[in-house]
Image (cartoon, rainbow, N blue to C red):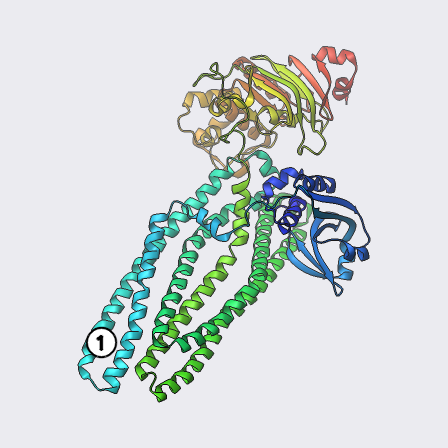
């Protein structure tokens, strides 16, 4: 969960309390979560849509005890939490960012902003949805590995048999060889034990080999599925999350895949071993078996009592780890700014604070784990002594032989080991709930419209032929967009037309909606209203391959990666002809700069293009777009770092290519000769026309030019 999603997450908790389980991505849309979070009024409206009677109001802290709980309160002027209860001067909160925590009344009063949202089930409320299941999520994670998984389980089940042979051999050895002195039992018993050891060694090796194969396969599948799906999510998904947090989720996929392979297998085998050893103990003494099972219930009860607290601590530690990782990546990316401003020590202090919180959370979880790890061993040690005392009485009374006593003690040792393994694996499985939720954020977010199987628009018309590029004709009608349906519109009722080969410019002050229109035309955002037509066809009706082959966009944020110049221009597409690459570079006025460097097109580009100037980076990015030979090119502040001479030559080269252009610019020298100039203000069209006509009108465009 991101910080901006706290309101939606709180509503999810309230709905779950009443028996309605709704995925967070669905609530994110319902609550209108934007980059700035969600409004209380939107949360109330969303709750009512799900059948709750919801209302929001201001309240003094001492009146909260009279309000039905759970409710949502606004704290710290920037964060929503769920208030679960108040008693004895203590306040129980469920914080989406930190899990459950208890504050004193004074601490809560200092945080409480006075805004509270209350909820009760209404007549239309219906319980629905499925409770999140760790086992179900793990099953989805290991999907496609049934064969090696089944073989590893079978090998583990077979390992139970040697564990049953040893107690029987112990009984025979004590009763017949030691007590009765039947020396002829010695060699057969030795042979049985040696054979058992060989079988156990072989099965253990087989199981470990299968688990290694399973680890590798699941790790590859988990990480591959994560990246594959993430690349197909809408652009808005990335805009609402920190890059460091997303990188952390990719890193989670591999180790989580390994845990999903090993821990369920070992837990299931430990459970099966416990059952078999219990049945074997029953054959020797039902009374002693009952005593052992009663002792085993103590650590199981301890696990049940602490599992929720442990899960919360582990989830909190996982979120803290992602914050530490993300902040470190953020610092590396802005290292020049930190050094230039002399605030590197301040940044280090913030990072160290996050690290300290992570260590504190991990220590809290570690203390619970240590307690749970010690309980089974200690209890079973006491149980072994008690059983020994009871069984000694049975031996004296003649109800049990010495060999049976020794065999039973051997079974108790094996049972205790299986129980300890089971407890350890179940505890570890509780720790994967947090990482699974992180992966679920990616897995449950709907794919971008380009990749969704069920598209709302009709399929492509026959006029759009496979292999044929679009002509570049663009028509936008009554285009409307806001980052949330409930929020203010960023683009409102915009119309524009671009004929093939024509050029239209969008200008306006910062925040006027220019770049947003460009992203809408490129299909990166979904409009809330209006139509975008390419060659007369709805944008979504154009097959993805045709769309991306016909339309290119150069953003104001330059993105170059470490690799060769050729790779940066072709995005690793080895099928692009060399002549096409060179033509694009020449038209972008960067060819001479490339060939002047060592290696030419095979020369190195460092991360973010650090070894190229700002103007060169812009021209490399424009060349990358021209390599595609688009019929419609969107330029968003793409030439802001170029001097006027190079800029004019580059734009002339683009015009000679015959592709239509939608130019978004602050610097008006690049748009004087456009076929139409559209001035935007607050997302609406304020003026439109040619340069001379707009200058003569003396309106907003003239003010922009003269400012």
Q: Is residue 256 above or below residue 32?
A: below
Q: Locate residue 451, reporting x and y percent.
A: 50, 31
Tally of numbered discs: 1
Q: Locate residue 584, reporting x and y percent.
A: 49, 21
Q: Is residue 65 above or below residue 669?
A: below
Would you identify the image quadrant in which residue 195 lies? bottom left
Q: Locate residue 187, reporting x and y percent.
A: 19, 77
Q: Residue furthest bottom?
A: 396
Q: Which residue is mark 1?
A: 189
Q: Residue at x 20, y 84 (%)?
A: 182
Task: State the residue in front, 270 or 211.
Answer: 270
Residue 374 visible in this rendered orientation of the protein: no
Q: Residue at x 22, y 75 (%)?
A: 190
Quadrant of the drawing holding the C terminus: top right
Would you identify the image quadrant in which residue 53 lies? top right
Task: State the residue in front, 33 or 344.
Answer: 33
Task: State the residue in front, 322 or 636.
Answer: 322
| Element carrying mark 1 | helix
Q: Locate residue 429, reporting x and y percent.
A: 49, 57
Bin the neighbour count of mark 1 within 10 Å (Cα to Cα): few under 14, some 14-19, many 20 and up.
Answer: some
Q: Residue furthest front?
A: 123
Would you identify the image quadrant in which residue 509 lies? top right
Q: Is residue 574 above or below residue 62?
A: above
Residue 43 visible in this rendered orientation of the protein: yes
Q: Is residue 398 left or right of residue 21?
A: left
């Amino acid at each position: 969960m991101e910080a901006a999603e706290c309101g939606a997450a709180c509503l999810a908790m309230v709905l779950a309390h009443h028996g309605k389980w709704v995925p967070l991505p669905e609530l994110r849309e319902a609550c209108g979560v934007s980059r700035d979070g969600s409004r209380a009024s939107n949360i109330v409206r969303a709750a009512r849509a799900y059948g709750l009677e919801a209302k929001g109001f201001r309240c003094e802290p001492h009146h909260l005890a009279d309000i039905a709980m759970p409710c949502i309160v606004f704290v710290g002027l920037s964060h929503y939490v769920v208030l679960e209860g108040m008693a004895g001067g203590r306040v129980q909160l469920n914080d989406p960012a930190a899990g459950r925590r208890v504050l004193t009344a004074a601490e809560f009063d200092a945080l409480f902003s006075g805004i509270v949202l209350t909820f009760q089930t209404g007549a239309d409320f219906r319980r629905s949805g499925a409770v999140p299941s760790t086992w179900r999520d793990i099953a989805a994670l290991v999907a496609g590995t049934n064969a090696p998984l089944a073989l590893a389980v079978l090998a583990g089940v077979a390992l139970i048999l040697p564990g049953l042979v040893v107690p029987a051999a112990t009984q025979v050895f004590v009763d017949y060889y030691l007590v009765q002195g039947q020396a002829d039992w010695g060699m057969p018993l030795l042979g049985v034990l040696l054979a058992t050891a060989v079988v156990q060694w072989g099965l253990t090796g087989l199981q470990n080999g299968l688990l290694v194969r399973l680890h590798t396969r699941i790790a590859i599948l988990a990480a591959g599925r994560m990246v594959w799906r993430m690349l197909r999510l809408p652009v808005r998904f990335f805009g609402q999350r920190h890059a460091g947090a997303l990188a952390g989720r990719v890193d989670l996929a591999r180790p989580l895949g390994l845990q999903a392979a090993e821990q369920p297998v070992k837990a299931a085998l430990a459970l099966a071993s416990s059952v078999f050893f219990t049945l074997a103990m029953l054959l020797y003494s039902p009374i002693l078996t009952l005593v052992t099972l009663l002792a085993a219930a103590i650590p199981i009860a301890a696990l049940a009592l602490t599992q929720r607290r442990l899960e919360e601590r582990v989830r909190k530690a996982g979120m803290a780890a992602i914050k530490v990782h993300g902040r470190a990546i953020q610092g590396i990316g802005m290292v020049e700014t930190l050094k230039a401003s002399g605030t590197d020590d301040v940044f280090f202090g913030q990072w160290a604070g996050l690290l300290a919180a992570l260590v504190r959370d991990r220590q809290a979880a570690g203390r619970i784990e240590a307690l749970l790890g010690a309980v089974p061993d200690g209890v079973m040690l006491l149980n072994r002594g008690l059983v020994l005392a009871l069984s000694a009485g049975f031996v004296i009374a003649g109800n049990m032989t010495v060999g049976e006593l020794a065999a039973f003690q051997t079974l108790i040792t094996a049972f205790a080991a299986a129980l300890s393994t089971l407890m350890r694996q179940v505890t570890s499985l509780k720790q994967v709930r947090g990482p699974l939720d992180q992966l679920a954020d990616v897995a449950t977010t709907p794919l971008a419209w380009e990749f969704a199987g069920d598209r709302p628009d009709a399929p492509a018309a026959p006029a759009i032929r496979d292999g044929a590029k679009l002509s570049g004709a663009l028509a936008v009608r009554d285009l409307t967009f806001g980052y949330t349906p409930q929020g203010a519109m960023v683009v409102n009722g915009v119309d524009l037309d671009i004929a093939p080969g024509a050029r239209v410019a969008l200008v306006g002050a910062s925040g006027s909606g220019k770049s947003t229109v460009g992203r809408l035309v490129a299909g990166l955002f979904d409009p809330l209203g209006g139509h975008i037509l390419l060659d007369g066809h709805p944008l979504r009706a154009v097959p993805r391959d045709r769309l991306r082959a016909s339309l290119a966009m150069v953003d104001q944020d330059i993105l170059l990666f470490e690799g060769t110049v050729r790779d940066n221009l072709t995005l690793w597409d080895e099928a692009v002809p060399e002549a096409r690459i060179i033509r694009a570079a020449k038209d972008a006025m960067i060819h001479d700069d490339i060939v002047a460097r060592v290696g030419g097109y095979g020369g190195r580009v460092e991360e973010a293009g650090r070894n190229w100037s700002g103007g060169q980076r812009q021209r490399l990015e424009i060349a990358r777009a021209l390599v595609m030979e688009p019929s419609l090119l969107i330029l968003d502040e793409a030439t802001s770092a170029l001097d006027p001479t190079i800029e004019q030559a580059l734009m002339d080269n683009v015009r000679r290519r015959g592709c239509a252009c939608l130019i978004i610019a602050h610097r008006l020298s690049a748009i004087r000769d456009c076929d139409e100039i559209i001035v935007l203000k607050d997302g609406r069209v304020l003026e439109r026309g040619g340069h001379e006509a707009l200058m003569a009108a003396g309106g907003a465009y003239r003010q922009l030019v003269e400012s």
